[in-house]
Amino acid sequence: MMIVSQLREDQKLAFIKAFAKLAARDGKIDDDEREFIKGMALTYGVPAARIDEIWEQGDDAELLAELKEIKNRKAALMLIKEMCILANADEDLSDNEVLFIGQVGEAMGVEMSKIQEISNWVLERLIWLEKGRLIFEEV
């Protein structure tokens, strides 16, 4: 969180717009997703007056151009990680989501091998958490 808070306001907004764009990949954004993304925006320091901009879904090229302005490598890697987590949250990772995550990473200068490494780590973490839930009989 500290890394994102160091970004400029426009970069923070682009960071959050990427989540909204990813959440919309399945054709809809439900109320839970909206609240989660809004909460993230406020947590990361996006001013409340700019929250509505998150939902203005322009074309991908426009957002990718905004994301190119994020030069902080740690922030870029964090965005990829968080997008991988969000994309896997519904246990239905689509090709469209994978493609978009790749485009976002590429826009910020993250190598495809690094994106794949992050994606694999997220999947391993989710599997590990599910195993723990089963082992400790948390149904």
Image (tube, grey):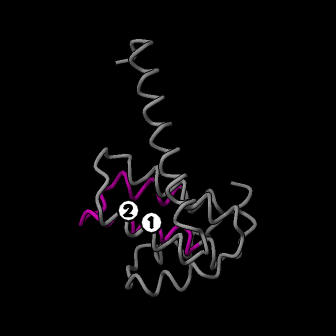
Locate residue 3: give its quadrant: bottom right
Instruction: Tell me what residue is drawn at x 43 percent, y 86 percent.
Output: 61
Q: Amino acid at mark 1?
A: Ile
Q: Are marks 2 and 1 in contact (CB under 8 Å)?
A: yes
Q: Which residue is mark 1?
A: 101
| Residue 24 coordinates in the image, percent (x, y) | 32, 66
Q: Which residue is mark 2?
A: 98
Q: Residue furthest front?
A: 113
- Give the left or right position of residue 124, taking residue 47 as reference: left
* Most foreground residue, 53 or 100: 100
Instruction: Tell me what residue is drawn at x 38 percent, y 48 percent.
Output: 88
Q: Identify the magenta region.
A: 13-39
15 w.r.t. 88: above or below: below
Q: Amino acid at mark 2?
A: Val
Give the alpha-carbon distance from disc 2 to disc 1, as whole Å: 5 Å
Q: Residues within 10 Å of mark 1 (few under 14, many from 20)?
A: many
Q: Tell whether position 59 is magenta.
A: no
| Residue 62 coordinates in the image, percent (x, y) | 46, 87
Q: Residues within 10 Å of mark 2 (few under 14, many from 20)?
A: some
66 w.r.t. 21: above or below: below
The N terminus is located in which quarter?
Answer: bottom right
* Most foreground residue, 68 or 121: 121
Instruction: Tell me what residue is drawn at x 60 percent, y 75 percent.
Output: 108
**Secondary structure beneath label 1:** helix
The C terminus is located in which quarter?
Answer: top left
